[in-house]
Structure formats: C-alpha cells, structure tokens
Image (tube, rainbow, N blue to C red):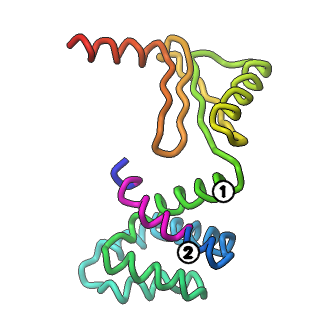
Amino acid sequence: MIAISAARPYAKAAFETAKAANQLPEWSRALKQLALAVCDVKMQLVLKNPNYTPKQLSEILSAFTDLLPIQNFIKLLAEKKRLTLLPSISELFEADCAKAAGYISLTVTSAWMMDDAQRNNTTAKLSKQLNSKCEIEFKVDEKLIGGILVRSGSWVLDGTIKGTLERLRSAFA
C-alpha cells in the first residue's frame, strides 16, 4: 500500500506526459518492461548496491527504451531513489489508461461462487454505479460470510457481512 501511495504522483505525471505526447502505448510498453526488469533478482541486487550512482542506474534502465521522455523519467526516479516503485507506477499507469478509455478493472470477491446471471447483474450494477465499463475478475472467499468486496487499485467497497461486523465491533470498542 505504501508503494502505491508513493508511486501515484509519478504514475500520474507519466500518464499526463504520455497522453499529451500521444504516446500512451509506447509508455505502457516501456513501463511494463521496466517493471519486469526491476523485479529481476539480479537487478534488485544492482539497485540495492550503494556503489552504483543514480546516473549509472538510470543508464542501465534507459537501455530498455529509446524514447527520451521515458529516459528522463527514469533519470528522475533514479535521482529520487524511486526506481523500485516502477512496478507500482506501471500498474497505476495501466489503470489510468483503462479509465481514460472508459474501462475500470475490478476484483469482486464473494462468499460463494456466483452463477452467470449473478455475475452479469453485478457487472451491470457496478458499471452503472461507476459510470464506466467494468472488467471484473470474480473470486471466492468463504470467510466473508455474505455480500461482496469490490477492489480497484487502492480503493475498496466493502459490502460484506464480515466487514459490517468488523465496523460495528470497532464502533463499540
């Protein structure tokens, strides 16, 4: 959660820059590649090694793209010691792209396996409520007792019995 919060302003800046330059696909590809690179075990050792300067680190990662604005973005992240945020930045960037295209990616968790009619009904209601087309991944967690838990990025809509009981317990504690 901390990484998402720290990554949010960088992802927003990347999205606005890419959108203004009409380069959303290029930025998307580059950020995905960079996110994979910094998740590599060997690259993590390099990023944690104090012998590498921010300039050296940015040069290493800039090899993944030939677009100058992305290279400047990498340089900024290296100077601020934020290169490890690239996976979160990429995730938030993709969410912004989907939202700009009119889509929201959600995870809906329920206490039981929903049938097709329930899934379609849930999708229709959430699309209407959020005023966007929703791409939903449905999951099951029997511990929820009943209701549904909706997640998208960093926000949560908890309509579960378990969540309601926990909120009541906190209110009376």
Residue placed at 69% from the left, 42% from the top? 132
Using the image, determine if residue 155 lies above or below residue 122: below
Q: Which residue is mark 1?
A: 100
Cα separation, mark 2 vs mark 1, equals: 14 Å
* Type of the residue with mark 2: Thr
Asked whether disc 2 touches disc 1, contact meaning CB atoms under 8 Å apart, the reply is no
Q: Secondary structure at mark 1?
A: helix
Residue placed at 46% from the left, 79% from the top? 73
Instruction: Inspect the magenta stretch and tell me whether residue 62 lies in it.
Output: no
Residue placed at 29% from the left, 86% from the top? 53
Q: Quadrant of the C terminus?
A: top left
Query: Which class describes the residues within 10 Å of circle 1: few (<14), some (14-19), or many (20+)?
Result: few
Residue 50 in the image, given as x and y percentages of width and height: 24, 79
Q: Nearer the viewer, residue 48 or 148?
A: 148
Residue 120 in the image, given as x and y percentages of width and height: 77, 26
- Describe residue 105's horizontal placement relative to residue 57 as left or right: right
- Describe residue 132's horizontal placement relative to residue 79 as left or right: right
Which mark, by number, is residue 42?
none
Q: Secondary structure at mark 2?
A: helix
Using the image, determine if residue 165 lies above or below residue 2: above
Query: Can you tell which quarter of the image residue 148 is in?
Result: top right
Most frequent secondary structure within the magenta stretch = helix
Q: Which residue is mark 2?
A: 17
Q: Nearer the viewer, residue 49 or 152?
A: 152
Please report the bounds of the magenta region as a residue range: 4-15
Instruction: Inspect the magenta stretch and tell me whether residue 5 lies in it.
Output: yes
Residue 85 in the image, given as x and y percentages of width and height: 41, 63
